[in-house]
Amino acid sequence: MNILFMGTPDFAVPSLQMLIDSTHKVVGVLTQPDKPQGRKQILTPPPVKTLALVHNIPVHQPTTLKNGAISDLLDQTQPDLIIVVAYGKILPKYVLDFPRLGCVNVHGSLLPRWRGAAPIQWSVIAGDTDAGVTTMKMAEGLDTGNILFMEKTKIGERETAGELFDRLAVLGAQLLEKTINQLAIQDMDGIPQDETQACYASMLDKEMCVIDWARSATELDCFIRGLNPWPIALTTLDGARVKIYAALPESASGTPGTVLEADAKKGLLIACGTGALRIMELQVVGGKRMSACDYLRGHAIACGTQFGN
């Protein structure tokens, strides 16, 4: 069948590669426009575009899908099916209605839990024990379509959002292959989502990264892992911003934010609302990312020092 693929980040790459390797024809790829990245703000193509160009697949980067913006493209490519994996734009009704087999989305959560832009990160932040991927028939609402297939996986005790992201990207491609193989045999309506179980995974930003030391050590451990590799949990020390990449919860007590232990061999222990966090890896903004032990070898921190919000 002819497939039009819509996707942008690394998460979508295994799914596109699976389609390229299949017997189906990828008639085109839609992805977000190139964006400036890094300190030098170099214009960089999305990972999906890079893969598509390697395989000589036509790439389209519209700034909008509204008002029939891609009607001509749909007419030209005549897709039997549109696959959407972390594309980053809402599909208008004229797009949803065009392919004879509809539009299928690969979503990085166990729907209806964590609809929205950052389901993988929020599953870690919330302390969920399970995560997964869902394929669904797309509807006009945000991740509200009928569920086709679902695959569940345990979230590792120390797993970061980035590590889970990589695992679910592969799992999503496998589930998409299963979904497409079934659609090739017969159309599927899927199962309606239970609206009473729905929750929303809002987009992450740097404003939400500040650590509230009054929260429990267990909650903050999930918070730190959920924000790794971006945008990274943030605190302050003597007015300087400090990024926290990794920490371990421990049983200890003290005023939230207070340094209980600062030893170059044992590391840095900070009191929380309940328990304490042993900081494993940090970065003073403007400096290098390093282990807490290495940092303490060059920077003395007295017990009783207060980390801020």
Image (cartoon, rainbow, N blue to C red):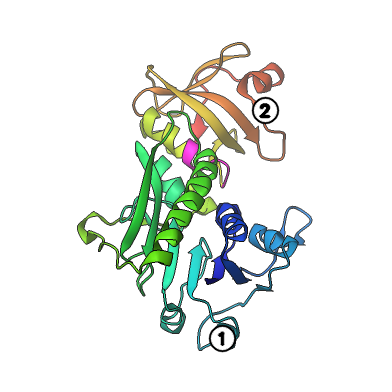
**First of labels 2, 1 by sequence position:** 1
CA neighbours of label 1 inside 10 A, class few (<14), some (14 to 19), many (20+): few
**Image location of residue 220, percent across then percent down:** 42, 34
Magenta range: 225-230
- Up the image or down, 66 lies above or below 151; here it is below
**Image location of residue 233, percent across then percent down:** 52, 40
At label 2, the amino acid type is Met
**Image location of residue 30, percent across then percent down:** 60, 71
Q: In front: 61, or 281?
A: 61
Q: In front: 68, or 24?
A: 24
Q: Which residue is mark 2?
A: 290
Please, what is the dominant secondary structure of the magenta stretch? loop
Residue at the location (75% across, 53% down)?
39
Residue at the location (56% across, 83% down)?
70
Residue occupying the far top of the picture: 265
Residue at the location (62% across, 60% down)?
20
Indicate the secondary structure of the residue bearing disc 1.
Answer: loop
Indicate the secondary structure of the residue bearing disc 2.
Answer: strand
Any part of residue 211 in sight: no
Q: Is residue 249 magenta?
A: no
At label 1, the amino acid type is Ala
Q: In front: 39, or 96?
A: 96
**Image location of residue 205, percent across then percent down:** 52, 54
| Picture quadrant where residue 111 is located | bottom left
Q: Which residue is mark 1?
A: 69
